[in-house]
Amino acid sequence: MLIFVNNKAISITDNTHFVKDYSKNFDFVYDVKTEIIEFKEMSGNVLVKNTNFSNILNFIKFAQANKPQNLGHLTFEVKNEELFKLKIKDKLQVIKAAGGVVENHEGKILMMKRLGFWDLPKGKADPNEKSKKTAEREVEEECGVTVIVNDKICTTWHTYMLKGKLVLKQTKWYAMKLISDKNMKPQIEENIEELRWMDTDEVEVALQNSYNSIAYVLKKSELKMLV
């Protein structure tokens, strides 16, 4: 499970046993059974072994309030990843959303600028709405384009504060093909400032002023197109 907390990527896995040489994959390796972990002192790519739900939730709360500037990618090793998923979804309010990577007839990707950052169109699901329908509706509402929704790309998770409480957003992402952009315009009431079709090089530049979760989705989209 990959969770983005304050734009930091956190992996939770029960599959680190395959790593033969930790030094090639991580800058630092900690074990909560034998060490006291100081979150604020973490830097680089870090593996924390033998963690439990409380360890991880404490870090998420810390990172949400205090973005660890020097931390790269953090991996928590747990005994059972699926059990962790069930527990975090039980303990935190989960907000469901969906969005899309829209490709036009020239192979360009639709990017949108919201609150000064480049993003992909997405939004919250209506009650009892299927994620594929949410993705189509949100893309059409936010960007004024019509699309065909194809296969699911991936699911992302990220945390944020809502009315003083930590919540978890689940976003399902779909590959989409453009039908028409003749009515394309940004949904101003959703703070969307600009829409732009971008080629690969332009997307790379845009990602320098974006979110790690968006880079992750676009990478997953590229890999899916290669299969």
Image: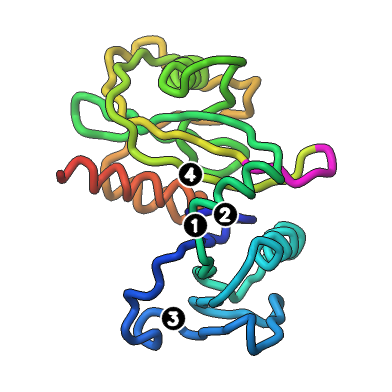
Residue 165 counted in the magenta span = yes
User: Looking at the image, is mark 1 or mark 3 nearer the viewer?
Assistant: 1
The kind of residue on which mark 4 rests is Thr
Instruction: Give the number of the disc on residue 159.
Output: none
Q: Observer-nearest residue: 157 or 147?
A: 157
Q: Residue at x 55, y 38 (%)?
A: 170
Q: Amino acid at mark 3?
A: Phe
The residue carrying pointer 4 sits among few (fewer than 14), some (14 to 19) or many (20 or more) residues within 10 Å by Cα, namely many
Q: Residues within 10 Å of mark 3 (few under 14, many from 20)?
A: some
Work out whether mark 1 precedes mark 3 in sequence or the reverse, and give the earlier one: 3
Q: N-terminal of the two: label 2 or label 4?
A: 2
Depicted 118 relative to depicted 75: above or below? above
| Circle 2: residue type | Phe
Which numbered marker is on residue 81? Answer: 1
Does residue 97 appear left or right of residue 227 in this picture? right
Q: Which residues are magenta?
A: 163-168
Residue 176 spot, x, y in % from top left = 31, 25
Which is nearer the N-term, disc 1 or disc 4? 1
Q: Where in the figure is residue 188, as x and y percent of width and height?
A: 61, 21
Total residue callouts: 4
Q: Label 4's element?
A: strand
Instruction: Give the spatial CA distance, label 2 vs label 1.
Output: 5 Å
Name the kind of residue labelled 1 in the image.
Glu
Eye-nearest disc, 2 or 4? 2
Mark 2 vs 4: CB contact within 8 A: no
Secondary structure beneath dot 3 equals loop
Q: Residue at x 45, y 29 (%)?
A: 99
Q: CA distance from mark 2 to mark 4?
A: 16 Å
Task: Decide if residue 167 is on the left or right side of residue 122.
Answer: right
Q: Earlier in the sequence, mark 4 or mark 3?
A: 3
